[in-house]
Image (cartoon, rainbow, N blue to C red):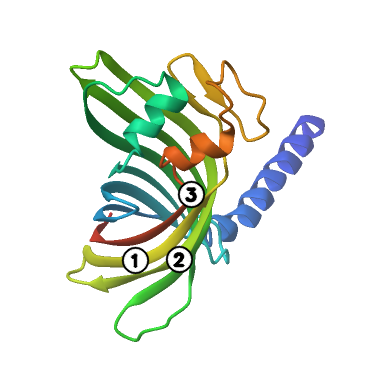
Amino acid sequence: MTKIAVPILLFTISLSSTAAAQGPARADAAKPQFMAGFQLGYNSGLGASGSGTISSFARGFPLSAKLGIWYTSVEPGQAWDARQIFINNNTNGIPVEQGKNREFKLDFLYPVGLMRSANTHFFGGVRHSSFTGNFKFVGGNEDFDVTSSQWGLGAGLEGYFGMSRRFDLVVAGGVDYYFRSTLQGHDTAYSPDNDNVNPREDFTYADADAAISQPKVKPLVMMGFAYHF
């Protein structure tokens, strides 16, 4: 009986020691904080965004992580040049054009404390853009899209001004930079290295890039609200 009791006793003591060692660590574990936001503003066009932010997800880690989704109405480019570079040289019809840009932005925020009245942060991170420019020639039998998909980087400052225990007014400014990417329209594509597909006449990527207003350098000014969970 004693031979059985001793191992059981030792095992029980071991479990108790492990639990005691883990107890303080769990008590000191990070308590993540979540925040949801909605913003309106200018990002090379009028746009709106929704975002989610998590902070204090690791003890002593000073950065917060923010994922935002933007939709912006933008100027698509020069309709007649786009038609000539991607379709043909016809000059009939009345051009009607519209552009849109969908972006995903992942930022890390670092508190900088620039103003006593606000919780201010420097932010920086990566971006991905999906651009679409539509060109329609009424009476000219042409209706085509020019698209691109780009990666980029961005940075700026944002401030949170307390309105209540849960709500903040958010104001931000910054700039995004997007790297050059292939422009595709109809059955034609122009690439930055000029490895083009079915190019029209002697047009190059530089010509297509000048005609189409895909994202390049994009200033950002926005205002919105944030809710703390």
Q: Residue at x 34, y 86 (%)?
A: 116
Contact flag, marks 2 and 1 (Cβ < 8 Å): yes
Write down the residue under mark 3: 216
Viewer-nearest residue: 1 or 26: 26
Horizontal and vertical percent for residue 164?
Answer: 17, 69
Q: Secondary structure at mark 2?
A: strand
The reply to whether discs 1 and 3 touch (Cβ–Cβ < 8 Å) is no
Q: Is residue 219 visible?
A: yes
The image shows residue 17, relative to residue 203, as above or below, that is below
Question: What amino acid type should be assigned to the residue bearing mark 2?
Answer: Gly
- The image shows residue 112 at horizontal and vertical percentages of 47, 77
Q: Is residue 139 left or right of residue 207?
A: left
Q: Is residue 203 left or right of residue 156?
A: right
Q: Earlier in the sequence, mark 2 or mark 1?
A: 2
Name the residue tied to disc 2: 156
Q: At 41% from the left edge and 18% from the top edge, which residue is drawn? A: 88
Q: Choose between 151 and 225: the one closer to the eye.
A: 151
Q: Amino acid at mark 3?
A: Lys
Q: Between label 1 and label 3, give the one nearer the viewer.
A: 3
Q: Residues within 10 Å of mark 2 (few under 14, many from 20)?
A: some
Q: Quadrant of residue 80?
A: top left
| 1 or 3: tag closer to the N-terminus | 1
Q: Does any portion of residue 32 appear in the rendered image?
A: no
| Residue on which the image places disc 1 | 172
What residue is shown at x 30% (from left), y 27% (from top)? 135
Q: Nearer the viewer, mark 2 or mark 3?
A: 3
